[in-house]
């Protein structure tokens, strides 16, 4: 008798982050990550058809602290890659995906028209490149645009720039130091990753607009389903959107 492979789970939930509803998808399935990228671009295209502003995406990477000190020049191995556009977050369990990264996700990260915002984003990009060959073309370092001499936490920047009380978006250190390559993340880990990506997205939008005020909520929502059939051959990410049938 041949043992059946256990299907990787997909967990979707709606979290309250700073008083705002955030749809969070947690998965190690490449097809789900693929659909999130397609849906994000499709909705952005509809809502900003006549806007010259590019898409801003919050980005973060979590890793499991090693038992031994890393060799000089070595990078931590990512456990999760979390991204957020509007109020839709994806926590992709890249360590559990068996190295399977959808081509559309690779092109999404490498598209210079999409700005990926994060705190210490350069370090996250180095990890993604070192272990998965992922290149991020356009980044925004929140520590530079967020003031405070680059020493402020995301929660402190969110309070100053977005008007969100820091207590609502604090990220507990013990969660950040937990095991991120496990098959099933804890609710605390899922929330930590979603808060990181969502706040990074909102701060990135605010800094790119150059306005120290609460930004308006975008209307992104997550849709069900796991797969989109990937269009063949075209390198232009925006061209792919014309071939999407919802």
Image (spheres, helix red, strand yellow):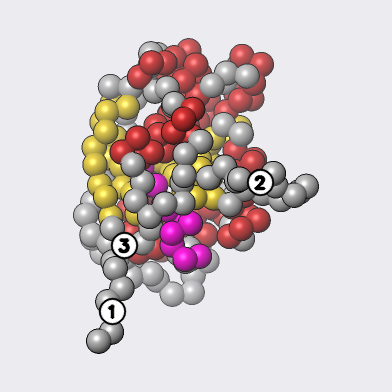
Q: Nearer the viewer, mark 2 or mark 3?
A: 2
Q: Do the residues labelled 1 and 3 touch (CB within 8 Å)?
A: no
- Identify the mark at residue 8; answer none if there is no mark: 3
Q: Earlier in the sequence, mark 2 or mark 3?
A: 3
- Identify the mark at residue 68; answer none if there is no mark: 2
Q: Is residue 86 visible?
A: no
Report the residue at 36% width, 46% height from top. 185
**Horizontal arrangement in the rendering, residue 108 relative to residue 29 (left or right):** right
Report the residue at 21% width, 54% height from top. 224
Q: Residues within 10 Å of mark 3 (few under 14, many from 20)?
A: few
Q: Are marks 2 and 3 in contact (CB under 8 Å)?
A: no
Residue annotated with mark 1: 3
Image quadrant occupied by the N terminus: bottom left
Q: What element carries label 2?
A: loop
Q: Earlier in the sequence, mark 1 or mark 3?
A: 1
Q: Distance between the residues labelled 1 and 3?
A: 15 Å
Q: Are marks 2 and 1 in contact (CB under 8 Å)?
A: no
Residue 78: % across, % down:
54, 50
Report the residue at 54% width, 35% height from top. 118
Report the residue at 28% width, 22% height from top. 19
The residue most toward the right is 72
């Amino acid at each position: 008798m041949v043992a059946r492979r256990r299907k990787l789970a997909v967990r979707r939930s709606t979290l309250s982050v700073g008083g705002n509803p955030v749809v969070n998808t947690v998965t190690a399935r490449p097809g789900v990550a693929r659909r999130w990228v397609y849906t994000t671009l499709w909705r952005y295209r509809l809502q900003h058809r006549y806007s010259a502003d590019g898409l801003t995406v919050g980005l973060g990477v979590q890793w499991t602290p090693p038992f031994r000190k890393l060799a000089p020049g070595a990078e931590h191995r990512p456990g999760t890659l979390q991204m957020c556009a509007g109020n839709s977050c994806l926590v992709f369990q890249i360590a559990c995906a068996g190295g399977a990264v959808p081509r559309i996700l690779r092109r999404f990260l490498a598209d210079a028209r999409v700005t990926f915002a994060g705190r210490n984003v350069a370090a996250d990009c180095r990890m993604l490149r070192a272990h998965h060959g992922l290149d991020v073309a356009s980044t925004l370092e929140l520590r530079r645009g967020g003031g405070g001499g680059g020493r402020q936490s995301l929660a402190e920047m969110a309070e100053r720039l977005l008007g969100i009380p820091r207590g609502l978006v604090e990220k507990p250190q013990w969660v950040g130091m937990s095991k991120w390559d496990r098959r099933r993340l804890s609710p605390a880990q899922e929330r930590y990753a979603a808060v990181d990506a969502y706040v990074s997205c909102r701060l990135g939008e605010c800094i790119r607009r150059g306005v120290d005020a609460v930004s308006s909520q975008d209307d992104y929502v997550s849709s069900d389903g796991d797969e989109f059939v990937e269009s063949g051959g075209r390198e232009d990410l925006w061209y792919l959107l014309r071939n999407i049938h919802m």
